[in-house]
Amino acid sequence: MAELKVSAIREGTVIDHISAGKGLKVIEILGLGRLNGGAVLLAMNVPSKKLGRKDIVKVEGRFLSEEEVNKIALIAPSATVNIIRDYKVVEKFKVEVPDVIEGILRCANPNCITNHEYVTTKFYVINKEPLKVRCYYCERTMEEDEILANL
Amino acid sequence: MEWKGRDIISIRDFSKEDIEFVLETAERLERELREKGHLEYAKGKILATLFFEPSTRTRLSFESAMHRLGGAVIGFAEASTTSVKKGESLRDTIKTVEQYSDVIVIRHPKEGAARLAAEVAEIPVINAGDGSNQHPTQTLLDLYTIKKEFGRIDGLKIGLLGDLKYGRTTHSLAEALSFYDVELYLISPELLRMPRHIVEELRERGVKVKETSDLEAVIGELDVLYVTRIQKERFPDEQEYLKVKGSYQVNLAILAKAKENLKVMHPLPRVDEIHPEVDGTPHAIYFKQVFNGVPVRMALLGLVLGVI
């Protein structure tokens, strides 16, 4: 495999095995494009044994919260998260779509009570691949496109 | 299943055994009511009916049910006369009202409002319709009506006609019927077809589903025709409503092609989708259906209050 054309990071997080084309969305939902943060490196459409093609996001000086990892799982269920310290991978895990998604997703139904009152949203995952969820409150189902638009 | 304190929010929360238990309890209460005239099971209990949008029928049916059980009723029939007009949140309204009552019945224009109310309240909450989502007590009274008329639900061919897109009664009823061995005919204009995810779920659960826009072509096969109003108020776009307004009218000419024992149901109110000339025929059971709301709601109130 050709050597990746992105440099290693000293400390931070590498999100690997993002399905090709989803890397930018990962950067967007994690808010990594904001100024004043550490360096963010994005590799798009690089060869992958597992996926054929994949995206990789490297974030310098930043570690992810559980909520952020859950968000990545919704966009890129195949992703792996590597925690880097002193240029070494000290922890590596695969993201996992939770059975219940709380607080990180808006309901696409404009008439859902969660879009009108102060409520922590809650969705039951009814299918993980392709992702399909049901709003606990209004019972409307959302599929991948709507989920991405409402993260 | 523990019924005392239980919330009645969605037909999805029910198992077939739960449904059957409610129908049997309703039947028992209807019989007792007929024998005694008045029951005292809920004496000293207070029902709060919170109707954030108008619904005379459902509200009166719940109120009648509570009175028939010997309980008392407080509440409001429209949000404009309450503190909601001052900007009070649903959460606060519920927290306040539960201090005054033992059980809450809520009708709200927003989907999911009843679920939120149930989460906030420590007393049982019954959903009397939340937007275009669920209306579980209507579904239970519909099932009760079918069972009373035919002595069974299994083996019937049931047509749902009209607004299957926005009509919550047809969504809940279709879901509940999937517990039974029925054939469903979904009859609607193209624009108002049953949401795909519901049709897929029905098929996954083994229900034979036929979708059509041609009532005349299928009416001869049906045992039950469940007619719904095309509800102007549910359409986000009035132009869309105008395209489908008056798509169907059940009248004597259409019924001439039906089976002799076809039963026509309607959750009411109707506008012009069933001609008044049908009212006098043995097909029409929609006013009996209205009556059946009372024993079914008596059963639910009594069960969640833990008094029957």
Image: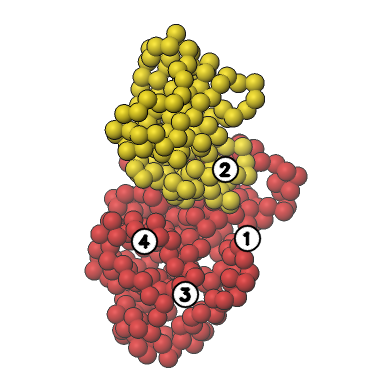
Q: Please, what secondary structure does the residue beneath circle 2 have?
A: helix
- Circle 3 sits on which residue? B189
Closer-to-camera residue (A150/A39): A39
**From the viewer's perspective, is the residue at label 4 or at label 1 nearer?**
4
- Circle 4 sits on which residue? B199
- Distance in Å between CA atoms under marks 4 and 1: 30 Å
> From where the camera sits, is residue B167 visible?
yes
- Circle 1 sits on which residue? B54
The chain ID associated with circle 2 is A
In the picture, which chain is yellow? A
Q: Are marks 1 and 3 on the same chain?
A: yes
- Residue type at tag 1: Pro
- Circle 2 sits on which residue? A114
- Residue type at tag 3: Pro
- Distance in Å between CA atoms under marks 1 and 3: 27 Å
> In the rendered view, how is the structure colored?
by chain
Q: Are marks 3 and 2 on the same chain?
A: no
Closer-to-camera residue (B147/A17): A17
- Distance in Å between CA atoms under marks 2 and 1: 22 Å
The chain ID associated with circle 4 is B
Label pair 1/3, CB-CB below 8 angstroms: no
Q: Residue at x 49, y 55 (%)?
A: B133
Task: Tell whether B88 sits left or right of B214.
Answer: right
Q: Residue furthest front?
A: A2
- Residue type at tag 2: Thr
The chain ID associated with circle 1 is B
Label pair 2/1, CB-CB below 8 angstroms: no
Dot 3 crowding, Cα within 10 Å, few <14, some 14–19, many 20+: many
